[in-house]
Amino acid sequence: MKASFLMCPPRHFGVSYVINPWMQGNAGQVDTALAARQWDALYAAMRQIANVHLVEPVPGLPDMVFTSNAAVVLDGRVIPAQFHHAEREGEETHFESWFRAEGFEVVGLPGGIAFEGAGDALYDQTRGCLWVAYGRRTRAATSVLLHEALSVETVPLRLVDPYYFHLDTCFCPLDDGWLLWYPPAFDAAARSEIELRVPAARRIVVGDEDARDFACNAICLAGNLLVNRASPQLQRALRSAGYRVIELPLGEFVKAGGAARCLTLRLDESRAGSPAFARAA
């Protein structure tokens, strides 16, 4: 059975404010026609390997296209985002309405605690844990709250680089226990925790150039790795690990601080390893 994802067409996408370093200097600089073509290519590639559901974009919410930030979903239970920046708060009600209409169980966190969905909470199927970042957008208390709401082990990781403000920009759990990651984005305690839990032989370290190209912001599914760009050296490492690397240029979205994974949200992640949400798109 195909996996299920949520995407949002980039009808209203652009850089109209600055809430991260990637946006600096890019306000009004997005080629919207090119962005639409780039998104369409990702959408077409995703539909080859997954069921893709769409949420209707809303005028005035340009970052709604980054559905990864909308929520974290595990076993059919949704923990919706509470955005750190006021510019994105308007997205919350639209995403929550979509989840409720689709029959998901929606469980909100206490008000006032910033949490930016699967941008900062990534489930590791091999280890049965939820890696949870804090320090840039999501608050440290979220790790405990997600543990209580989802009954899953959570592993808090502190992010320290403003350019890698979400976990999914610098950390990507892959199939079969592999990990793609950029160590400088984390503090020393987080690096030690990752190295303790993931054997060195299963860690693929991303260099500065690949990190800037959002190589960690990848979608791993059925042996495929969909990514904005990966250097020849990184591609060799990924192929050696058994992955088919599919480059899909997403440069217009990088101007806003996101790429492939940011543009999608997994809807059927399950601790049992089988889909928890399987309605055909």
Image (cartoon, grey):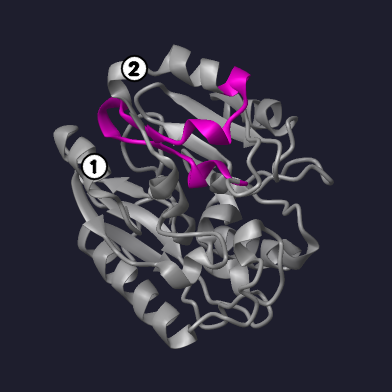
Residue 77 visible, this orientation: no
Residue 273 located left or right of residue 143: left
Total label count? 2
Residue at 41% across / 55% down in the picture? 213
Q: Position of residue 118 (x, y in %)?
A: 54, 46
Tell whether label 1 touches label 2 (CB within 8 Å).
no
The kind of residue tagged 1 is Gln
Whether residue 135 is situated above or below residue 90 in the rendered picture:
above
Name the residue carrying label 2.
200
Quarter of the image for residue 35 reads bottom left
Q: Is residue 252 magenta?
A: no
**Residue at the outermost top position:** 196
Q: Is residue 186 magenta?
A: yes
What residue range appears in magenta? 165-190
- The structure residue drawn at horizontal position 46% and vertical position 61%, both measured from the top left corner, is 263
Give the residue number, with chain letter if any, for mark 1: 233
Residue 116 in view in this figure:
yes
Where 229 falls versus 170 (above or below)?
below
Q: Nearer the viewer, residue 225 or 231?
A: 231
Q: Is residue 269 above or below residue 132?
A: below
Q: Which of the image's four quarters has the C terminus? A: bottom left
Give the crowd class for mark 1: few <14, some 14-19, many >=20 residues within 10 Å.
few
| Among the 4 quarters of the image, the one containing residue 157 | top right
Residue 79 location in percent, x, y?
62, 44
Q: CA distance from mark 2 to mark 1?
A: 18 Å
SS at mark 1?
Answer: helix
- Amino acid carrying label 2: it is Ala
Residue furthest bottom as drawn: 33
Residue 6: % across, % down: 44, 61
